[in-house]
Image: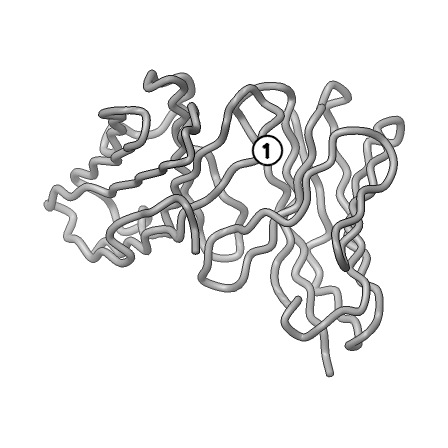
Amino acid sequence: DTEVTQTPKHLVMGMTNKKSLKCEQHMGHRAMYWYKQKAKKPPELMFVYSYEKLSINESVPSRFSPECPNSSLLNLHLHALQPEDSALYLCASSEGGGGSPLHFGNGTRLTVT
Amino acid sequence: QKEVEQNSGPLSVPEGAIASLNCTYSDRGSQSFFWYRQYSGKSPELIMSIYSNGDKEDGRFTAQLNKASQYVSLLIRDSQPSDSATYLCAVNHNTDKLIFGTGTRLQVFP
């Protein structure tokens, strides 16, 4: 069982919908991440939060909006997505500092119709 | 551009054999190296971490790092069909940003 919990496991949304992905970790990690992964491709970094502050934004379109309410929670708000945004969205956490591995949640499979 | 390169495969090995997965990286300042296993439709799972030159063994897995050659490898001994997955190499340059290779698909046949 993963120590990083993501909800929902699956999400289908229309292009005009607003939805949110949620992630929770209780490992005391200071860094949390959102990755996007398309089929047969490696995970692609979207955002990094360090000590609850956004530290990396990989030029992600504004229709993706991250939020870190506290050190254990990470949200990804979705609005006006495109069908090409359909992918597996992965949350991860780490102790931070560069030498620490990432621990991934089980992911949310998003389909945009 | 910092890059991590892997052969996409598939790498096919018979059950019981040693599978050897390779990864090269371009940033000479990289300091932390990780191997992840990813089953189809699932999330990546950490297999090994290695930080210094040489070998690191954990059960059937051995990670090897050669910083001079900018090369990291993963050996899987006594390969099992359940090892069939995509193996992702990931490299870190002392920041919060982990760079993934494209992954090597391993197939272990009975």
Q: Nearer the viewer, residue A85 or B21?
A: B21
Q: Nearer the viewer, residue B78 or B7?
A: B78
Q: Nearer the viewer, residue A2 or A65?
A: A2
Q: Position of residue A4 (x, y in %)?
A: 39, 44
Establish if A109 lies above or below A100. below
Position of B74 compared to A109: left or right? Answer: right
Q: Residue at x 41, y 43 (%)?
A: A36
Q: Position of residue A17 (x, y in %)?
A: 11, 46
Establish if A16 lies above or below B8. above
Establish if B58 lies above or below B109. above
Callout 1 secondary element:
strand
Specify the amino acid type for callout 1: Ile
> Which class describes the residues within 10 Å of circle 1: few (<14), some (14-19), or many (20+)?
many
Residue at far bottom of view = B110
Q: Position of residue B62 (x, y in %)?
A: 80, 50
Position of B105 compared to A63: left or right? Answer: right
For the rendered model, the colour scheme is one colour
Establish if A58 lies above or below A82. above
Chain under label 1?
A: B
From the image, which quarter does the N terminus of chain A lie in?
A: bottom left
Q: How many marks?
A: 1
Q: Position of residue B55 (x, y in %)?
A: 85, 41
Q: Nearer the viewer, residue A45 or B49?
A: B49
Q: Which residue is mark 1?
A: B99
Q: Residue at x 25, y 41 (%)?
A: A22
Which quadrant of the figure has residue B37? bottom right
Position of A88 compared to B36: left or right? Answer: left
From the image, which quarter does the C terminus of chain A lie in?
A: bottom left
Which quadrant of the figure has residue B94? top right
Q: Residue at x 67, y 55 (%)?
A: B104
